[in-house]
């Protein structure tokens, strides 16, 4: 009792009533519609959100520091765990950055296979986005249909490399395997199926009045807001800005490919939905162009650079020098020249960049990763206020963020 009386003057000076008549609500970090370990601190006035504060860091693994403490080849499988919905896009971005640092290029057939895997991964990401976003909003059937087609695409990747989620299907300097017999025929069959199914998805959603009520004029991003927050990918293109790194800063085989860059003018959730759907059609168009390119290319899969890249398995098993060189590269790692490089690629979610600083040792002196989902989470601070609480699920799901590449 004496302790309570001693604390009484302290409690008398604290006012528990909020003068602004608002309420704080935590959305996450375990909410099923938060799409990862995100915590949104929402300040509500009735049902209207007046302030939004995104919190990240609940999935932090120190990936950039890991990249500085692993030899270059050793770190490549770790990049799978960033955007784990489209892991090959991370593999490729990292491999391309190291190749630029080394001054080497992958053979044409390897580049064709890489581009096939990249566009299949884009489809995997978009189908996953469509399925989960539709489920969040309340469209159960689309979730089942989109996951069905996604399984066909996953089967293609599994037939190539044996993995379904984290692929590690790219190597620095090329790819480890050629396509198995009949794989291109299966790819063509998948493209035919997907073209028909995309029409069905749109038939269920595009003119659906409930879908339009939940998405139209919800989460509208202006061009100025998109630029100031560093948005990229579909989030940027839905505001009317035609910016795709495959076109603006071409890499790989993309300069040779004929495809359009879909844009929208509204900047809202519905505009981003339409861009996703049209981009899936462009992926199919690209994949169809790559099949004859593969058939016309020579059977070289890895760059010839003995100082940095191991010889073929046949040479390693038959030639003593190749075996010795392979042993050194695996145990000690390659030693790139001193310098720094930044390489950006167009991942399914936007600009994915790798900055590597080399001091000539087998380990990167500095590594920095630029992941699009990080910026698309930050924009929630300006984007959510003014909306209703029910719109938060729509906005978060529509932005297509993955926390594996945010909490690096």
Image (cartoon, rainbow, N blue to C red):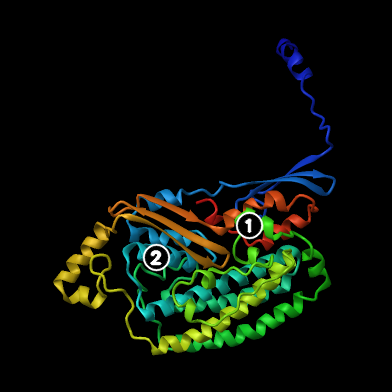
The residue lying at 37 percent from left, 86 percent from top is 297
Image quadrant where one finds the N terminus:
top right
Is 111 left or right of 34, judged from the image as shown? left
Is 364 left or right of 46, judged from the image as shown? left
Residue 192 at what x, y percent from top left? 59, 88
Q: Nearer the viewer, residue 136 or 243?
A: 243
Q: Which residue in the structure is indicated by mark 1? A: 227
Q: Nearer the viewer, residue 60 or 335?
A: 335
* Element class at badge 2: helix
Is 266 left or right of 343, judged from the image as shown? right
Residue at mark 1 to residue at mark 2: CA–CA distance: 28 Å
* Element class at badge 1: helix
Instruction: State whether residue 358 is above or below residue 144.
Output: above
The residue lying at 79 percent from left, 25 percent from top is 15
Instruction: State whether residue 363 is above or below residue 181.
Output: above
Instruction: State whether residue 292 is above or below residue 210.
Output: below
Residue 25 at what x, y percent from top left? 74, 44
The residue lying at 47 percent from left, 75 percent from top is 117
The residue lying at 48 percent from left, 84 percent from top is 290
Comes first in the chain, label 1 or label 2:
2
Evaluate if marks 1 and 2 touch, with contact meaning CB atoms under 8 Å apart. Answer: no
Q: Nearer the viewer, residue 142 or 49?
A: 49
Residue 134 at what x, y percent from top left? 71, 68
* 1 vs 2, front mark: 1
Q: Residues within 10 Å of mark 2 (few under 14, many from 20)?
A: many
Label placed on residue 95: 2
Residue at the limit of the structure toward the top, as seen here: 2
């Amino acid at each position: 009792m004496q302790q309570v009386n001693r604390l009484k003057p302290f409690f008398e000076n604290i006012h528990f009533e909020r003068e602004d008549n608002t309420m704080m609500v935590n959305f996450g970090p375990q909410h099923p519609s938060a799409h990862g370990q995100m915590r949104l601190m929402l300040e509500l006035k009735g049902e209207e959100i007046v302030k939004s504060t995104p919190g990240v860091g609940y999935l932090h693994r120190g990936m950039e520091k890991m990249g500085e403490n692993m030899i270059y080849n050793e770190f490549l499988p770790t990049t799978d765990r960033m955007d784990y919905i489209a892991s090959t896009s991370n593999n490729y971005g990292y491999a391309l950055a190291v190749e630029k640092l080394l001054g080497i290029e992958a053979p044409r057939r390897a580049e064709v296979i890489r581009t096939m895997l990249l566009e299949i991964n884009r489809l995997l990401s978009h189908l996953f986005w469509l399925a989960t976003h539709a489920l969040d909003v309340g469209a159960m059937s689309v979730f089942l249909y989109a996951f069905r087609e996604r399984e066909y695409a996953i089967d293609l990747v599994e037939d190539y490399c044996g993995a379904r989620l984290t692929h590690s299907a790219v190597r620095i300097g090329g790819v480890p395997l050629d396509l198995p017999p009949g794989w291109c025929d299966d790819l063509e069959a998948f493209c035919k199926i997907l073209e028909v199914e995309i029409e069905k998805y749109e038939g269920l959603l595009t003119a659906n009045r409930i879908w339009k009520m939940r998405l139209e004029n919800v989460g509208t991003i202006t061009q100025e807001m998109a630029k100031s927050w560093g948005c990229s990918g579909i989030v940027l293109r839905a505001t009317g800005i035609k910016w795709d790194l495959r076109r603006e800063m071409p890499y790989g085989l993309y300069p040779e490919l004929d495809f359009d860059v879909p844009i929208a003018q509204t900047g809202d959730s519905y505009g981003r939905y339409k861009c996703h759907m049209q981009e899936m059609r462009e992926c199919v168009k690209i994949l169809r162009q790559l099949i004859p390119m593969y058939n016309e290319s020579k059977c070289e899969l890895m760059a010839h650079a003995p100082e940095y890249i191991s010889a073929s398995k046949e040479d390693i098993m038959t030639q003593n020098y190749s075996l010795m060189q392979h042993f050194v590269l695996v145990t000690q790692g390659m030693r790139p020249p001193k310098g720094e490089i930044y390489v950006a690629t167009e991942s399914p979610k936007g600009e994915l960049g790798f900055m590597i600083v080399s001091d000539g040792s087998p380990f990167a002196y500095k590594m920095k990763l630029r992941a699009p989902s990080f910026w698309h989470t930050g924009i929630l601070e300006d984007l959510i206020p003014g909306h209703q609480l029910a719109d938060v699920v729509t906005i978060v799901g529509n932005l297509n963020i993955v926390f594996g590449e945010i909490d690096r």
